Image (cartoon, helix red, strand yellow):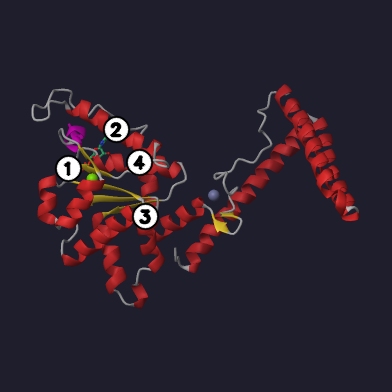
Amino acid sequence: MDLKRSQYKLIMQNYEKKQLNIKHEINKKKTEIYKRIPLIKVLDDEIASNSVNTTYYIIEHPDEAKEKLEQLQESNFMLSGKKIRLLLDNGYPEDYLQPKYDCNLCKDTGYIGNEKCICLKQAMIDAAYEQSNIKNIIKDENFSTFSFDYYSNSIDSRFNLSPLENIRIIYGKCKKFVNNFDTDFTNIILFGQAGLGKTFLCNCIAKALLDRSHTVIYLTSFQLFKLFEDYKFNNDNDKVPEEQIESIFDCDLLIIDDLGTEFNNRFTGVELFNCLNTRLLNKKSTLISTNLSPNDWSKQYSDRIVSRIFGNYEPLKIFGSDIRLKKYQ
Ligand SMILES: Nc1ncnc2c1ncn2[C@@H]1O[C@H](COP(=O)(O)OP(=O)(O)O)[C@@H](O)[C@H]1O
Ligand SMILES: [Mg+2]
Ligand SMILES: [Zn+2]
């Protein structure tokens, strides 16, 4: 992702800040523990001096390196075990002196070796798309705040199903989509009238996958096509960086909310087909929400787009009455 240098710098400063905070936190706890359980300091000193001694010994006797390192590992393991027992005996959790990272994969460094960690990739996506907004929304709109209270349990004769039964099934399918995200390649199109919780469900899925370290881009279809347009037609100064466009094609999940509200023309049709098709070929999941009914899809989009969607997306129809209105009452 091609960010402005200043944006990248800010993100990396954030990582440094996190690491400093963690170090600070650990030092504070150590001081406390050494005072309360002095034996832990003795053990820590022993662990430190063991590894220094081993290093010196290996420099002198490189042929014994393997054996000595194994010995060191063994003795560290034993000493750490003693430390844990002391902590537990004194009423502390066993991981009290372990750093608590936001991301255990990269230990809040942003990198695993030379590779960017998934958390850094997502941070860059967030910066590029100014997605910070979604972070706030998904605090309120997620699977744990999803309420079934707004869906009536009287049977809708058209479907022989109540809105409540229906949303329970859909909720379950969305959860399954998240749980099987790493193994099953699925795409979802949520459709139904306005105010039935389509965007809410998109946010539930976004949060669940972000929490599981996947890269997620959330865009309304209006924003998506604006990006494509700016990329294609703007001149150098406000051109959208190529890598930002690439991330639309290869992020783990792309959410296109409110499909059908973009200005429709030949250009958007080509771009939409290209985007959906490329993601299908790369086995990258897409989640679409739309107020349009399948009938409208074929009026608004070309046959090849509609057949891509029909053939490869699980259609989930939400019905019921507008939750916004219910909330007002
Ligand atoms: N399951 C739900 N529980 C609580 N509030 C909901 C739920 N679904 C939708 N809402 C609320 O109802 C309003 C409309 O939902 P929204 O997801 O925007 O509908 P849609 O995208 O289908 O038009 C929003 O204010 C949203 O927060
Ligand atoms: Mg919506
Ligand atoms: Zn990370």
Q: Is mark 3 within 8 Å of ligand 3?
A: no
Q: Mark 1 vs mark 3: give the one in front.
A: 3
Q: Mark 1 vs mark 2: give the one in front.
A: 2
First in sequence: mark 4 or mark 2?
2
Residue neighbourhood size for the residue with mark 2, other residues' Cα within 10 Å, grouped as few (<14), some (14–19), many (≥20): some
Q: Is mark 4 within 8 Å of ligand 1?
A: no
Q: CA distance from mark 3 to mark 4?
A: 20 Å
Residue neighbourhood size for the residue with mark 1, other residues' Cα within 10 Å, grouped as few (<14), some (14–19), many (≥20): some
Secondary structure, mark 4, is helix
Is most of the magenta stretch helix, strand or loop? helix
Secondary structure, mark 2, is helix
Q: As drawn, is 279 to the left or to the right of 327?
A: right
| Tag 3 near tag 4, CB within 8 Å | no
Residue at the spot 38% in from the left edge and 38% down from the top edge: 178
Q: Which image quadrant for residue 265?
A: bottom left
Q: Position of residue 113 (x, y in %)?
A: 61, 56
The residue carrying mark 3 is: 282
Q: CA distance from mark 4 to mark 2?
A: 10 Å
- The magenta stretch is 323-329
The residue carrying mark 4 is: 205
Residue at the spot 50% in from the left edge and 63% down from the top edge: 8
Q: In the rendered image, is residue 151 in sight? A: no
Q: In the rendered image, is residue 44 in sight? A: yes
Q: As drawn, is 42 to the left or to the right of 5?
A: right
Residue neighbourhood size for the residue with mark 3, other residues' Cα within 10 Å, grouped as few (<14), some (14–19), many (≥20): few
Look at the image and say whether residue 103 sits in the magenta stretch: no
| Tag 1 near tag 3, CB within 8 Å | no
What is the three-letter code of the residue carrying label 4? Answer: Ile
| Tag 4 near tag 1, CB within 8 Å | no
